[in-house]
Amino acid sequence: MLLAAVAAATFVLISLAPGDTAQVLAGQAGADPEYLALIRERLQLDRPLPYQVGSYLQAAAQGDLGFSIIQGRPVRDAIFARLPASLLLAATALALSALLGVTLGVIAAARRGAAVDAVISVFSLVAYSLPVFWLGQLLVALFAVRLHWLPAGGMRSADAPGDIVDVARHLVLPATTFSLLLATLIVRVTRTATAEALGEDYVRTARAKGMSERRVLLRHALPNALRPVTTVLTGYLGIILTGAVLVETVFVWPGLGRLLYDSVLSRDTPMLAGMLLFSSSLVVTANILADVLYRVLDPRTRFQ
Amino acid sequence: MTLRPLLGSRRFVVGALFVLGVLTAAVFAAVAAGDPFRTSETILAGPSRAHPFGTDELGRDVLTRILNGAATTLKVAIAPPLVAAVVGTAVGLTAGYFGGLLDEILLKLMEFTLVVPRFLIALVAAAFFGGHLWLVGVVLAATFWPSTGRLVRAEAISLREREFVEASRSFGASSTWILAKHLLLLVAPLVAVNTSFQAGQAALIEAGLAFLGVGDRNLISWGAMLADAQSYLGMAWWISVFPGIALALMILALNLLGDGLADTFDVRGRARL
């Protein structure tokens, strides 16, 4: 229901934009009027807007997101073709950032008020404020342009198709950039949540039993702290998706973010509408998943 | 509530001073600095006495352009979050305090606007309608207010059952009086924190759009300067590094402001972006 409203709104917004889609598709100005009329008829651009919205929604409900003339294939196929690259980048970045973010967050919480805590908190605030596209640009300038250690962009070299090491080398810079953005979010949430958990009764009990501080932290406080971390992160999904678009654009990574950027530049309306719908369904799905995950992680809610 | 404790927060003071500094720079640029569009023969020259931050690919002075770009960032970082703060507070208080059907409708509206990431909406809008700064501002205000509204609503719901509100009501105070006199003051810190974080996000989004080439081409934007720098990374680090530092410091300052406010008024954890 929510998704249908989003899809309709997106469609109307894009349709209201100045410029004639038929004109764009026909190429240069001054195209044959008969040809323009044919394009309009084929794409049903001559029908009233509510009709267009209605038929779009009906098709979308059945998984048909329309056809992208620019990509030369159905929107759904184009999205699924780009999905693996995006997932690879996102999964690598998420793994790296979870490792870095949770470690730093726990250290900061354990040494609350100490110098380490202050350093970590300043680091996460500064890193959070770094525009992700600028960071990417600096890394490219240093490691690709100046030192020639790593490729500046893309996912594969032309002369080494399908080589895993080659893909990995291409992955280093975008994954580092992206994971730094994610890590800053994770550090802040982990620190707050762990600090809160350390104030709970069960932690006092564990300490009273003579358990080592390290064990208290890792066995008792951290598992309980990870719960809010997962839910809060889904709340940041908008920032994460935005980061993906910018990182993929800077590094010419052949994923969905780059596809979105290319579609914006080429005014590929069906592609854009489909991708916005796809990203909003991602947000909705993530929220549902977070609820489920919360149940799994918190035994107390399981029996209700 | 007094604002004095804020001066005790180092983060707030540093952030506020920096934002004031950028404001001064923008005013200075408007009245005294050189012409940011003037080209010269000395292209891609490194930092020197004549050009402290070097020159770009058209021989334009990078420092002058950074100073002139400050106004763009400030406009977009200040206006939309403030509009969102006013609208969000009004809607959030109304929905939370009165509840019922009105609340449900307003909540649905707010959730609806939050589903699509605002950068993507801004990107598509800017690409199709031209990235005029006011348009970006409108999109930001339109997507910021629901998150403010949702926070305020939750706060209003927990506040409306409190004793002092009941007491006020029993004295015959009208709903308008209670909302304006009590609840407004109590949600103000939360709104202030949220608004500063949104300001940082607004600056970032404007720069991001300009970086992707869908920004306002008639304005000097730090993001657009970074986009221009992309082609000359090997030759001239200064056309990427200096505008980038300006942008990062600006966003950092706005986040520090938010952090300082959150610490001082103890609303940490409740305000989110």
Image (cartoon, coloured by chain):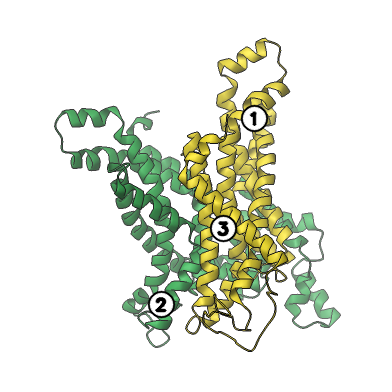
Chain colours: A green, B yellow
Q: Are marks 1 and 3 on the same chain?
A: no
* Residue under the image location 58 percent in, 49 percent down: B198
* Residue under the image location 37 percent in, 40 percent down: A193
From the viewer's perspective, is B83 left or right of A287?
right
Q: Amino acid at mark 2?
A: Leu
Taking depth in this image into account, of B6 and A279 the one nearest to the observer is B6
The chain to which mark 3 is attached is A
* Residue under the image location 82 percent in, 59 percent down: A48
Residue that mark 2 sits on? A142
Q: How far across and down, in percent of the image, does residue A125 sit?
A: 44, 53
Taking depth in this image into account, of A250 and A124 the one nearest to the observer is A124
Taking depth in this image into account, of B233 and B59 the one nearest to the observer is B59
Q: Are marks 2 and 3 on the same chain?
A: yes
Residue that mark 1 sits on? B184
Q: Residues within 10 Å of mark 2 (few under 14, many from 20)?
A: some
Q: How many marks?
A: 3
Question: What numbered label is drawn on residue A278?
Answer: 3
The chain to which mark 1 is attached is B
> Which badge, 2 or 3, is on the more N-terminal residue?
2
Circle 2 sits in a helix, a strand or a loop, which is it?
helix
The chain to which mark 2 is attached is A
Spatial CA distance of label 1 from label 3 is 38 Å
* Residue under the image location 60 percent in, 47 percent down: B114
Q: Amino acid at mark 1?
A: Leu
Q: Quadrant of residue B189?
A: top right
Reply above or below: A144 against A246.
Answer: below
Circle 1 sits in a helix, a strand or a loop, which is it?
helix
Circle 3 sits in a helix, a strand or a loop, which is it?
helix
Q: How far across and down, in percent of the image, does residue B152 sit?
A: 60, 34
Spatial CA distance of label 1 from label 2 is 50 Å
Q: Amino acid at mark 3?
A: Phe
